[in-house]
Amino acid sequence: MKNRGTIVIIFFILVILPINIYAEILISDVGVEYESEILNKFNEDNQIELKLVIELRDESGIIVNGTKEEKREQLRQIDEWFKPRIDEVLLDYSNNSNFVILDKTSRGFAAFTSKDSFDKLAEDSRIMKIDIDKPIYPGDNEIGNESDIIAEEYESSEETIKYKQEIDFVYLKILITFIILLTLVVMWFI
């Protein structure tokens, strides 16, 4: 009986061990994905505006397959399909003073937005995903020089590497947990 209690305790520790707390992916009522970090920045960090990257929903119906040339042409067609959709969404938000368009991407755009604008974007069914880029602090109106931009790109690549390492670590913990559980099951029957 003592062994069973020990096994139960070990099992719960091993089940809880692989659980990490990351930015939670939230989904709005209309299916827009965004990270909880965006809400945290607005609510807890009292951010006035955030730089967000908005990706539109692909409803083109174009499936990318075939030869390399066919895929290239299909991707070009998808890009062409997105252009008027992006303009349409931007036109809807262009009258909002709390929404500053920064750049267009192939499937969306980047913009400085307030909490109110973010809430509207999160309830826009044409949008698929909203990602945070870089926060804006009150009074920070300077545009960085080239070395600042390079430093930001370097920090961004470091974040990508860190994120990949965190994912690799999670997989490693899952593998170790599986091996330990398998060992416990084998010991149980011996």
Image (cartoon, grey):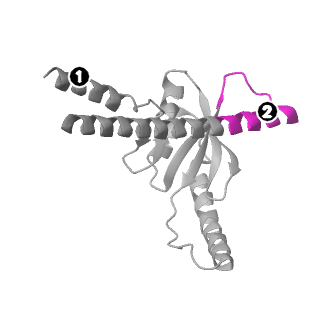
Q: Mark 1 highlights which residue?
A: 6
Marks 2 and 1: CB-CB under 8 Å?
no
Q: Does residue 187 lie above or below 137 as drawn?
A: below
Secondary structure under the numbered disc 2 in the rendered image: helix
Left or right: residue 51 versus residue 21 is right
Q: Residue furthest right?
A: 146
Q: CA distance from mark 2 to mark 1?
A: 51 Å
Q: Residue at x 39, y 51 (%)?
A: 30
Which residue is found at the position 64% from the left and 35% from the top?
159
| Left or right, residue 180 beside residue 22 | left
Please state if 166 lies on the left or on the right of 187 as rendered.
right
Q: Residues within 10 Å of mark 2 (few under 14, many from 20)?
A: few
Considering the image in quadrants, where does the C terminus appear?
top left
Instruction: Examine the structure image and report whether residue 143 is included in the region drawn in magenta.
Output: yes
Q: Give the camera-side residue of 127 and 120.
A: 127
Magenta stretch in the rendered image: 135-159
Residue at horizontal 58 percent and vertical 25 percent from the top = 47
Q: Which mark is residue 151?
A: 2
User: Of label 2 and label 1, which has the lower sequence position?
Assistant: 1
Q: Is residue 20 above or below residue 34?
A: above
Tell me the residue at 52%/33% (across/down): 38
User: Does residue 68 show up?
Assistant: yes
Whole-percent x, y for residue 39 in the image: 48, 31
Looking at this view, name the residue that lies furthest to the left: 1
Count the numbered circles shown: 2
Q: Nearer the viewer, residue 151 or 17?
A: 17
Callout 2 amino acid: Ala
**Which three-letter amino acid code belongs to the residue tagged 1?**
Thr
Residue 176, image x and y in percent? 42, 36
